[in-house]
Image: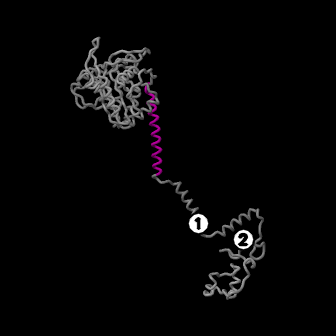
Amino acid sequence: MSGFDGNNNNESENLGGVYDFGDYYDEGYEQDYQNGQYPQQPYQQPYGQQEQYPQQPYGQPGAQPYGQRKSGGSGGRPQRPSGSKKSKKKSKKSRNDYRSPYEYNERAAKKQKKSKKAYSGKKSHPVRTAIKVILIIIIILFLLANLLLWHYCGLVENVERGERTVTNASMHSPHVRNILLIGSDTRSADEHGRTDSMILLSINSETKEIVMTSFMRDMYVNIRGLTTDGEGIDTWGKMNAAYVYGGAELLMDTIEYNFDIQVDDYVYIDFYSFVDIVDAIGGITVKITDEEAEGMKAPMAEQNKIMNKEKGSDYLTHGGKLNLNGNQALAYARLRYVGNADFERTSRQREVISKIIEKVKSGGPLMMLDFAGTAAESLRSNMSQWELFTLSYKVLFSMKYKIVSVRIPDDDSFYYDTTNDGQSVLGVDFDKCRELLEKKIYD
């Protein structure tokens, strides 16, 4: 084009940065030229009236502008029908050809990044894999433990709940569960013999304590409720006679009526099943005196006869800190005529139960399973299988609770008395006993 040389730098600067007049024109160029603003630029036709110059996209020399491509001639290509598949493919390919290399590289980078993510997802990190495996194992063990616990709860002999007449005690709390543990010398719960052990196990989730309260068998109390025949009873007698008259329900009513404390449920165990429970955990370690070791021979002789053991089995020749098997531990818990009679006997019973709990807590899962399986077959309760299952969880979570020992009546709340028929009994100051229970269990 005349008046312009692409190699002339000075002239290009005078043109205001426009280098190719074949591409851009403005209506004002004509006036500017006439006024001499661009003296070296020839006049061109105003925009909109100029001839159609072929537009050459970047990187595609000789290509025609989109929508103005001729059907023939130099630089033109024959057009296919718009509906044909080949034309669609070629038009798609031509659009890709028009893409900027930067845009193409960006798409390729995204695609490569996605492929890397997909590949990396197939091969997980070894730490994550190990964590998943451990979690799966924990879940499986948890399910198996629950199934086993459910099975053990089903081994407990369940009896129907008898009718209760006294259930309005003022001492109760949603944080406290009171389970009455009943022990007897009889080999069958159906015999309804006198109960030698009556211990209220109070699990307090608020104070994190398990309170074991022994009720002495010779307390003179008001026995009120229903007999096993369904008849009403309201009489005074020794505490352990309530079970003879009306079973576990009347015994719970008697405790609740006289001491104003709620009794939720009960668990019964005969003393001879107690032998198997202690043996299942490998015995318990107890510190006994020489006098106690000698006194244990009398109850042990009776036990050997009932359990068909050889005469003189398991006798102790001396005292000390000894590991007692089930037969010896039972004789120690039943020992009455050494020390302060029944006062010390209830203390020994609480000690034996505490030793069993401590041994199970420190023995690990296998010992706990042996204990649970053996104990379940020896127990009888008014709780259903589901109730025992939920109670088992409560007991498991309370294994670290502090164990507190209480005796009713304590030293300041009883006196020796004699009934009209000549029986020696313990007179009770009920108000003091109630205050003690409230302080130890609910305070």
Identify the amino acid type marked 2. Tyr
**Quick one: SS at disc 2?**
loop
Kindly indicate the quadrant of the structure image that contains residue 207: top left
Q: Where is residue 48 in the image (x, y as percent from the top left)?
A: 74, 77
Q: What stretch is highlighted in magenta?
A: 128-157
Q: Which colour scheme is used?
A: one colour
Residue 132 sits inside the magenta stretch: yes
Residue ID at (62%, 82%): 16
Q: How far apart are marks 2 and 1 (CA)?
A: 25 Å
**Quick one: SS at disc 1?**
helix
Residue ID at (73%, 80%): 46
Front in this rendered view, residue 253 or 218? 253
Residue 139 sits inside the magenta stretch: yes
Residue ID at (30%, 20%): 219
Above or below 36: residue 363: above
- Label of residue 106 in the image: 1
Query: In which quadrant is the C terminus drawn?
Result: top left
Q: Where is residue 55 in the image (x, y as percent from the top left)?
A: 70, 75
| Residue at the far top in the pictured view | 421
Above or below 361: residue 199: above
Callout 2 crowding tier (Cα within 10 Å): few <14, some 14–19, many ≥20: few
Q: Mark 2 points at which residue?
A: 66
Judge left or right: residue 181 versus residue 313. Answer: right
Q: Position of residue 391 (x, y in %)?
A: 42, 32
